[in-house]
Amino acid sequence: MNKFLIFLTDQLKIWYHLFTAFLGLFLPSRRKDVSKEIVLITGAGSGIGRALSLKFANLGSTVILWDINKSASDAVADEINSKSPNKAFSYKCDCSKKEEVYRVAENVKKDVGDVTILVNNAGIVSGNKILDIPDDKIELTFQVNSIAHFWTIKAFLPAMKKNNHGHIVTIASAAGMFGSCGLVDYCASKYAAVGTHSALTVELFAEKMDGIHTTCVCPTYIDSGMFDGVKTDPWVMPIMTVDYATDRMMTAILTNQHLLMMPRMLYLAYYLQSCLPIPVQLLLNKWLGGYHAMDTFIGRRKQQ
Ligand SMILES: NC(=O)c1ccc[n+]([C@@H]2O[C@H](COP(=O)([O-])OP(=O)(O)OC[C@H]3O[C@@H](n4cnc5c(N)ncnc54)[C@H](O)[C@@H]3O)[C@@H](O)[C@H]2O)c1
C-alpha cells in the first residue's frame, strides 16, 4: 500500500477509535467470558492476588496460584476447590528467581495447559527513605515488582502469540505514576512495571497481535495489609478496601481496559503532572499525601 493510503486508513482508524471511546463514556462495555481461560496470578496467597483468584474462579476460570508462601496459596486453592473442584492449582514460586519462574512455568504447562491470562501481581515494599534502604532490599524490590514480569511474560507470551489470544495484566501502582516520600525504590520499580506494560502494548500492536490485550492497574492505598500504618486524608485519598479495588480491577480486565487508575481523580492529577510547573506539582503531591503518608508506615515487615 502506498504511503498516502496508509495515512488515510490510519486517519479513519483514529476517528473510529475516538468515536467508539466517546460512545464508551455512555454505554456499558461488554464483559468478556473468561470461563474457558487459564489464569495465572502471582502473589495469589494474600490481598489483591487472593481476591482476584477467587473472583476469576467464580467466573469459571481455571486459576493457577503462585506465591513464595506456598501455605498461603494452598489455602486459597483449597477455598476455591471446596466449591469448584479441580479449578485451582497452587505452586510455590519465588518470582524474583528467573530459573524458578521458568521451571515452575514448564510444570504449569504440563500439569494444566497454556496460560491465557497472566496477572503479574506479586509485590513487596520496604517503606524506608532512600538512605535507609539496605542495598539488597532495593535489588529485591526491583526483582519482584518489575524484573519478574519479564520472566513470566517470556514464559507465557509465546503460546498467547501462537493463538493470538491472551491478556497480560500488570498490577502496578499509583506509585508508578507519581513519586512519593519513603517509597523511592518502590516507585522506581513500579515506574518500570508501567513502562514494561506500555512498551509491550506497543510491541503487540505493531505485530498485529490484536487478540492479546494488556491492562495496567495503578491504585493508591488498599487495605490489604501491605501498607498498614499509612495515614491519608480520607477526603482526598481514601484507603480502598480489597473487595472494592479488585471489583474495579476485574471490570477493567473483563472489558479489556488498557489503564485503570484508582481513585478516578488520579487521571486528572496525571494530566496536570504533564503540564503544571514543578513547584505546583510538588504542592499537589503534598496535598495528595505524598510527603507524609508513609511516616506512620508499618507494613508487613513489622507485623511479622
Ligand atoms: N496494598 C496496596 O495499597 C497496593 C496499592 C497499589 C498497588 N499494590 C500492588 O498490588 C500487588 C499486590 O499487593 P497486596 O496489597 O495484595 O500485597 P500483599 O502483601 O497482601 O500480597 C503480596 C503477595 O505477594 C507474595 N510475594 C511476595 N514476594 C514474592 C515473590 N518473590 N514471589 C512470589 N510471590 C511473592 C506475598 O507472599 C503475598 O502473598 C503488589 O504488586 C502491590 O505493589 C498494592
Image (tube, grey):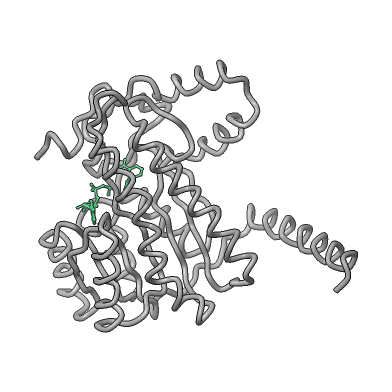
Residue 254 x, y percent position in the rendering: 47, 65
Q: Residue at x 24, y 39 (%)?
A: 137
Quadrant of residue 218 in the image? Answer: top left
- Closest to the observer, 270 or 80: 270
Left or right for 182, reference 79? right
Vertical arrangement, residue 94 with respect to residue 154, above or below: above
- Closest to the observer, 140 or 197: 140
Q: Residue at x 22, y 32 (%)?
A: 134
Q: Which quarter of the figure is the N terminus placed in? A: bottom right
- Closest to the observer, 164 or 149: 149
Left or right for 82, reference 278? left
Number of marks drawn: 0
Residue 75 x, y percent position in the rendering: 13, 63
Q: Residue at x 21, y 81 (%)?
A: 86
Left or right for 214, reference 188? right
Residue 235 x, y percent position in the rendering: 40, 26
Residue 138 x, y percent position in the rendering: 29, 38
Vertical arrangement, residue 78 with respect to residue 223, above or below: below
- Closest to the observer, 249 or 200: 200
- Determine if residue 244 is in view: yes
Vertical arrangement, residue 109 with respect to residue 198, above or below: below
Q: Which quarter of the figure is the C terminus placed in? A: top left
Left or right for 262, reference 96? right
- Determine if residue 50 is in view: no
Quadrant of residue 66 in the image? Answer: bottom left
